[in-house]
């Protein structure tokens, strides 16, 4: 049951993060990878798993099972804050995207460095984490992730009309009274937090955050007052079915969730393209 509940929360969080990224960056291929959030989370987890180096050690009250997850989340948050700090001068959407891609490559390189210097056992733990898995789900992690969803999703729903205007008119949405810069910065932070808190628990999961928003738009259109709920539902259903597939494809083994979502999502994505 914790794995199933985490699958639902993972699908909701990642799909909404992808929808927000695609909207604020006006890019149909945008996702948390675009701003380096996922690669930063991977680097944070690898530091904790490989060398027991974690910012979470500054919080001695944390349960041991949360140390790696918290370190991954803090590095994901750091990536988002770096993008915000570097784009405070009113940077364009293209500049924000380029900054995010640059951070992605930096954290990916740092992750490769950790993997190169790790021992065999440490390397195995890091790779297993990076593949993504729901087997690390516990009721404590499910509760924390659910609390994050309850906190962040209403903030997205409040700005649904503004997001629809931004999607339709871009910078010209300001004529309709939308504070475009504030909206972009707020949704960027929320998207990073949604993706970061899930990546911190289950690892790097691909394709859900890219495909689910497109499927939702095919079902209900571009209006965010409807596509937000549809995206969350599509992401949750897709992740639950992928979770089931991880347990039945190879009898007696549980495959990594990230592997299954990529293999099952790729044909569907090619069909969409």
Image: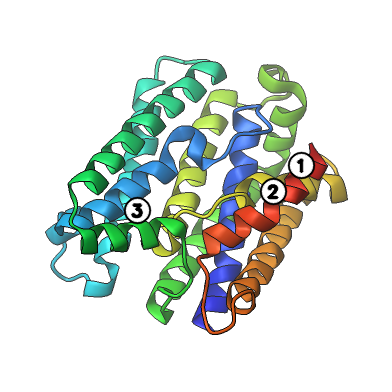
- Residue for badge 1: 270
Count of marks, rendered view: 3
- Residue for badge 3: 73
Label 2: state its secondary structure.
helix
Q: Residue at x 52, y 44 (%)?
A: 191
Label 3 and label 2: CA atoms lie apart by 27 Å
Task: State if disc 2 and disc 1 touch (CB < 8 Å).
Answer: yes
Label 1 and label 2: CA atoms lie apart by 6 Å
Foreground disc of the pair 3, 1: 1
Task: Kindly identify which numbered label has been placed on residue 255.
Answer: none
The tag earlier along the polypeptide, 3 or 2, is 3
Q: In this view, does 58 lie above or below 218?
A: below
Residue 221 seen: yes
- Residue for badge 2: 266
Q: Which residue is drawn at 54% across and 64% down?
A: 257
Q: Is residue 206 above or below residue 7?
A: above
Q: How crowded is mark 2: few (under 14 residues within 10 Å), some or many (20 or more)?
A: some
The tag earlier along the polypeptide, 3 or 1, is 3
Task: State if disc 1 and disc 3 touch (CB < 8 Å).
Answer: no
Q: How is the image coloured?
A: rainbow
Residue 162 drawn at (x, y percent): 68, 35
Q: In this view, does 138 lie to the left or right of 118?
A: right
Front position in the image: 56 or 273: 273
Residue 69 drawn at (x, y percent): 32, 62
Label 3: state its secondary structure.
helix
**Residue 100 falls in which quadrant of the image?**
top left
Q: How crowded is mark 1: few (under 14 residues within 10 Å), some or many (20 or more)?
A: few
Front position in the image: 45 or 10: 45
Residue 256 drawn at (x, y percent): 50, 65
């Amino acid at each position: 049951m914790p794995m199933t509940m985490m699958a639902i929360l993972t699908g909701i969080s990642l799909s909404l993060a992808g929808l927000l990224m695609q909207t604020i960056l006006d890019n149909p291929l945008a996702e948390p990878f675009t701003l380096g959030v996922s690669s930063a989370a991977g680097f944070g987890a690898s530091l904790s798993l490989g060398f027991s180096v974690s910012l979470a050690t500054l919080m001695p009250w944390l349960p041991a099972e949360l140390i790696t997850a918290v370190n991954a989340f803090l590095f994901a948050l750091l990536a988002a804050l770096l993008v915000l700090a570097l784009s405070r001068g009113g940077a364009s959407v293209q500049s924000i995207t380029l900054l995010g891609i640059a951070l992605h490559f930096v954290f990916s390189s740092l992750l490769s460095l950790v993997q190169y210097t790790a021992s065999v056992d440490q390397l195995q733990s890091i790779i297993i984490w990076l593949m993504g898995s729901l087997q690390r789900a516990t009721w404590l992690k499910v509760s924390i992730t659910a609390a994050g969803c309850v906190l962040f999703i209403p903030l997205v729903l409040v700005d649904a009309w503004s997001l629809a205007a931004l999607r339709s008119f871009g910078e010209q949405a300001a004529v309709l009274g939308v504070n475009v810069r504030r909206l972009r910065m707020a949704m960027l932070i929320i998207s990073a937090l949604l993706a970061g808190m899930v990546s911190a628990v289950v690892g790097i999961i691909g394709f859900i955050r890219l495909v689910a928003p497109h499927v939702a738009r095919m079902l209900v259109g571009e209006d965010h007052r409807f596509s937000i709920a549809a995206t969350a539902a599509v992401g949750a259903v897709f992740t639950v079915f992928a979770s089931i597939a991880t347990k039945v494809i190879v009898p007696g083994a549980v495959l990594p969730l990230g592997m299954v979502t990529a293999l099952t999502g790729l044909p569907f994505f090619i069909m969409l393209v």
